[in-house]
Image (tube, rainbow, N blue to C red):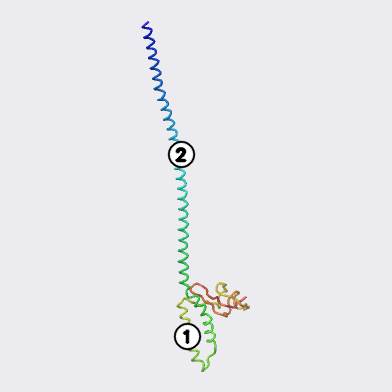
Amino acid sequence: MEEKDITNDEAKHEAGTEEANAAEEKPENDNNEVEAKDKQEETAKEAEEIAELKASLEKTTKEKEEFYERLLRLQAEFDNYKKRTLKEKQADQKYKAQELVTALLPVLDNFERALQVKATEETKSLLDGITMVYRQFLDALKEQGVSVIESVGKEFDPNFHHAVMQAEVEDKPSNTVIEELQKGYMLKDRVIRPAMVKVNK
């Protein structure tokens, strides 16, 4: 009878031990599940952060490229502005006398008309004085780069000549300037007044 009780006690003890072991294993399993869940959440959070960082990097890269392109455009525009300004400055320097010369051309025409008058004994000294002033005037204009456009005997060129009359002269080639009615002038390489001419048909 005692042996049976002892056996029952042992069985109870063993059952209690198994329950205790099971109870101990259960919290461990729960802990593992919690840890796994935490890891999943952490991984998901990390993946989300990486995605956000990638999006931010792409946005920053795009903005950088846009700024760089804008900078290149601004630099090109500034270079063009500098070249244009320099060109305009050089042109202004080169043709700075144009307005003054253009204003003086009618005076030059009047000098030439005065010199076409036949000199008499009374007007000879006056015409000599006018000739001297006229030559000084021409020299001053030449120093500024003014030159006369050659016309008579030359082929008509609309860039240099302004045809106001036509004639038919047999011994002259066609489209040739046969008479100059008003002199034309150039300032360096620019026509400031085309020559007024009569052209052969």
Mark linked to residue 84:
none
Measured Cα–Cα span from mark 2 to mark 1: 94 Å
Callout 2 secondary element: helix
Rendered residue at 44%/31% (across/down): 37
Q: Relative to 127, does residue 73 appear above or below in the rendering?
A: above
Name the residue nearer the viewer: 158 or 28. 28
Residue type, mark 2 in image: Glu
Callout 1 secondary element: helix
Residue under label 2, please give it: 48
Answer left or right for 27 relative to 127. left
Q: Quadrant of the N terminus?
A: top left
Q: Locate residue 106, reporting x and y percent.
A: 53, 81
Name the residue nearer the viewer: 24 or 118. 24
Q: Relative to 177, does residue 41 appear above or below in the rendering?
A: above
Residue under label 1, please give it: 133
Image quadrant in which you'd find residue 33: top left
Rendered residue at 53%/84% (across/down): 110
Answer left or right for 197 relative to 84. right
Q: Quadrant of the C terminus?
A: bottom right
Name the residue nearer the viewer: 123 or 169. 123
